[in-house]
Amino acid sequence: MCGIVGYIGNREASPILLEGLKRLEYRGYDSAGVSTVATGKLLMHKRSGKINELERELTMRGMPGTLGIGHTRWATHGEPNSENAHPHDDCTGKIALIHNGIIENYSVLKKELQAKGHHFKTQTDTETLVHLIEEFYKENGLLEKAVRKALLLIKGTYGIAVICSDEPDTLITARNGSPIVLGIGNHEYFVASDVAAIAEHTCNVTYLDDNEMAVMHRENLVIKTIDDRPVEKRVEHVAFDLEKIEKGGYHHFMLKEIMEQPQTIFDSMRGRLVEEEGTAKLGGIQHELESLLYARRVLLSACGTSWHAALIGEYMIEEYVRIPVEVEYASEFRYRDPILDRDTVVIVISQSGETADTLAAVREAKRKRAKVFGICNVVGSSIARETDAGIYLHAGPEIGVASTKAFTSQVTVLSLMTLLLARMSSMSSSRGREIVQELKILPEKVKQILNAHKDIEQIAAKYANKQNFLYLGRGYNFPVALEGALKLKEISYIHAEGYPAAEMKHGPIALIDDNMPVVFIATKDSSYEKIISNIEEVRARKGKVIAIATEGDDFIKTKADHTIYIPPTLEFLTPILTIIPLQLLAYYIAVKRGCDVDQPRNLAKSVTVE
Ligand code: G6P
């Protein structure tokens, strides 16, 4: 979703801003722009399309200045064209603003500003804010005061950065609901919506909290609340490996991240398995373990792929820990006055830790006094900071918009949590040790599946021209069917649906004919016989069957048109293996169809608007 970069120092700003924006490309965007201040003038350039094109134009025209802001936009209000791209400037052409989030009361404010003579050039909500700042700036001639006053009138969410040609030594940023991180250099400061954008310049960062505003001059930085009260901030040292956000020889980040999974799954377990005791150790939730163990009810909440991981978590916790679990989309949870009490534990799952609905769910749950746990990948993200306890995935930065390695790490972490809780209640040490042994060899098994990628590529080539797909699974593999279908639609734009296999009879079966590929997750587990019957039902209607099966199952070959094998594992861990061929299938189909896998249309990596 939208990205913010800002710079104040003694170096040329525009190359720093463009590099930073490129690091944020993965979040998804449709237009980009940069603004600097040079010799008392505000310079601005913006356009729809890719940053490379913006960069080419800037190189030709030149864009001097040691103070500047840059933005990638993911359209919410107004179509993705160059006018609506950020930065936006005021009527005087002196003030420039970039904004992530949504200004909810913009239409009322816009009318008032228009009545005062302000001229609007765009359809965006953001432009209202820059005119509002202009209005106060006219009154007091101080950018900081003007921004503060304007923000106090705003309803909605924002992460902003503002510059003004009259104040060439001032960069202002503020946050309410959209992440902002400040980078502290030597006589220079950086602002970004994501630490990846500034990591090559400094490891010293501080994160703004909601309702905070930072004013940076080349020689100092002051952070206060929006209503001008002092706040204490800590400077944190982030270790960020830039190599991890490069493609490393792969055509796409998505493929790189799929292939990384033996390592990322291992990293999610590193130091967390206690072999002799057959349990797990999870430092981040240790201090709140009792509330989890004695919870009368667990509520898992998330969005997208993370929601699918939550569904698997439900099955795991109910089976092994015997606590009733519910799973709810964060967007629904936050608005429907959920019943929570002190005996309910809420666990949110989010790769980015910034998804607006999930963050709002955290706040709603805390407001209602529930204990809130977080399972996040991005260290220091808003959700990670606002939850009472949490577990990091340690999967490294995920750049591909279609989430892959984060999913397998989420399921791995959920299995560790389940193991830990089960061992503290009714699970025996021998069963615990068996699970630990199996977890240890999972990365090897994932590697084995990845080695068969060429076979999956061939199947993909056969079906890449289809318009519809069905994905079916049962038990632990029902959420995998949902996730497999989601992967395909996200990047190949093929309509795909996931269902619990038995539900097929209640509707989707009407779609099946000889043109319909049906992907079955048909591993040798407690529902194997049942799923074979479902396969028969599809074959009887001439549907094409692609089966994900357990190694050694020769029988299934007589039933399926294509079989992709995975090594055997414990039933509750199968999703970590069965999803791998489905990720590869979606990837290769999308590539065959010529789709831009890393920048799928209309999607954003981190959805920071509700
Ligand atoms: C977006 C991404 C999905 C992701 C979802 C939830 O829609 O495109 O890949 O699953 O957000 O994101 P989170 O960061 O909260 O896991």
Image (tube, grey):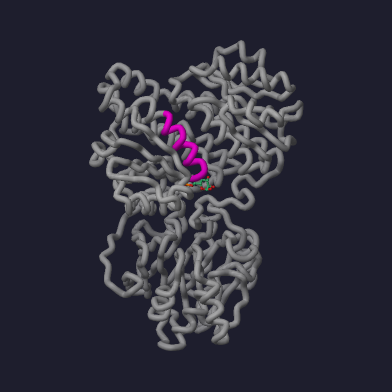
Asked if residue 434 shows in the view, the reply is yes
Question: Splitting the image into 4 quarters, where does residue 147 fall?
Answer: bottom left
Q: Residue 264: image x %, image y %?
A: 44, 36
Residue in view at x 53 percent, y 29 percent: 478
Task: Please indicate, yes or no, whether residue 239 appears anywhere in the rendered image.
Answer: no
Say whether residue 307 is magenta.
Answer: yes
Viewer-nearest residue: 355 or 371: 371
- How many badges with numbers are in the image? 0
Between 389 and 347, the one nearer to me in the picture: 347
- When the figure is inspected, residue 6 is found, relative to residue 357, above or below; the finding is below
Query: Left of 170 or right of it: where is 471?
Result: right
Measuring from the top left, give residue 358's x and y in whole percent: 43, 50
Provide residue 131's location: percent of width, then percent of height.
52, 79
Give the extent of the magenta segment.
303-315
In the image, 596: left or right of 475?
Answer: right
**Extreme residue toward the right, this view:** 514
- Left or right? Give the position of 215 relative to 129: left
Of residues 251 and 358, the one drawn nearer to the viewer in this rendering: 358
| Res 440 quadrant in image | top left
Magenta-drawn stretch contains 370: no
Classify residue 238 as left or right of residue 486.
left
Question: Dominant secondary structure of the magenta stretch?
Answer: helix
